[in-house]
Image: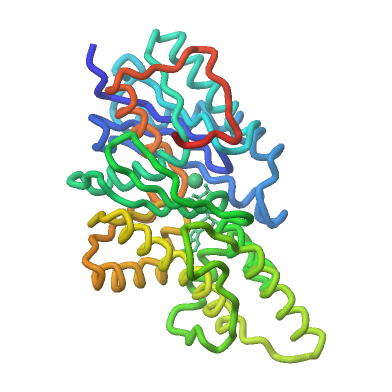
Amino acid sequence: MGLDLILGIETSCDETAAAVVEGGRRIRSNVIASQMELHQRFGGVVPEIASRRHVELILPVIDQALRQAGVTLADVDAVAVTQGPGLVGSLLVGISAAKALAFARRLPLIGVNHIEGHIYANFLAHPELEPPLVCLTVSGGHTVLFYVPRFGEYEVLGTTRDDAAGEALDKVARILGLGYPGGPAIDRLARGRDPRKVDFPRAMLDEGYEFSFSGLKTAAVQRLERARRQGEDVDVADFAAAFQEAVVDVLVTKALRAARDKGVRRLIISGGVAANSRLRERLLVEGRAAGLEVYWPPLELCTDNAAMIAAAGYFRLQAGERSPLSLNAEPNLRLR
Ligand code: KG4
Ligand code: ZN
């Protein structure tokens, strides 16, 4: 039997997602049921609520993914599911569904690293794209720079020592009263603004590939509190633009440094923050000036989805890898 048609399942955080991908690169369906509204009033994802909602949504979402792809379970060749990292209660819902389907239909099963999935969003979007390359993965939970010498091989160059970039953006958006998730709101407000109106620190800019965003976040919180205490007017858009610029500055500097040091010609970005228009704009301009091709996925593949999980799973299955039916959630899974 060939391994052409993969059913992907993703429930690592607050999106219940299923997708059917053909040949690792052709999306037949990509269904995402967002729980955003459920969590919005809490200002962040509530794990217990997320897993309960996944339980309600997982089967209808899988059904819809099959229907939209115009296939039935009998046509599916294998099941790929996010194993981690993520919220354990959320991960377990997708993993249980995947295991049940694999067992009932005697299908190969493959557990996929969520971060590897984010990288594969780029291979889905750009069929001609191939390693070697450097990848910057930035989301609400992760900030990682990788060197990818060939398919399926990863060298972690640097990660964040504290907060993820998206987490910092979300936090500052919240104190600015912009709601959750805050990244898109900051992006929108900052457009066309002068980012130099407020001065923010850039941590560890001059060396290496490690990131730190908690100092920047604290600086923003303190500045805002001081201004409010003293009755000063804070221009929210200027503040958002300056904060975003500080985050983007560090991301761009380190990504370009990694690409230069590794001698690659391609730089890709992935994860929810890869949707940020300022990050894209600066990487494009500065990347081109450095002789780099810069790639990112379309918006719907930047944030969590199951097509990227199916795509990453496809390549692992092709390489002969299989997961046992004892597959378990790994909330802190590392990329090897
Ligand atoms: O990849 P993702 O959907 O979930 C995680 O795995 O974390 O990323 C969500 C993150 C949130 O922090 C959100 O604020 C951020 O991505 N984000 C953005 C933008 N769109 C989403 N941040 C900045 N600018 C955007 N346009
Ligand atoms: Zn993600």
- Across and down, in percent, residue 25 comes to 25, 37
**In the figure, 48 relative to 317: above or below?**
below
Q: In terms of depth relative to the viewer, which is nearer, 307 or 145?
A: 145
Q: Residue 212: image x %, image y %?
A: 59, 61
Task: Identify the residue shown where x is 65% and y is 55%.
Answer: 40
**Outermost residue, left direction?**
128
In the image: residue 88, left or right of residue 96 = right
What's the image's color scheme? rainbow
Instruction: Looking at the picture, tell me which residue is in the foreground, 23 or 149.
Output: 149
In the image as oriented, which residue stretches furthest toward the right? 229
Query: Where, quadrant-wise, is the C terminus in this rendering?
Result: top left
Give the side of residue 291 with respect to residue 312, left or right: left
User: Which quarter of the figure has residue 120?
Assistant: top left
Write the residue at 51% across / 26% down: 59
Which quadrant, please, contains the N terminus?
Answer: top left
Q: Indicate whether 104 appears above or below 318.
A: above
Quarter of the image where one finds residue 259 = bottom left
Q: Residue at x 27, y 23 (%)?
A: 318
Q: Position of residue 139 (x, y in %)?
A: 51, 53
Q: Is residue 190 above or below residue 312?
A: below
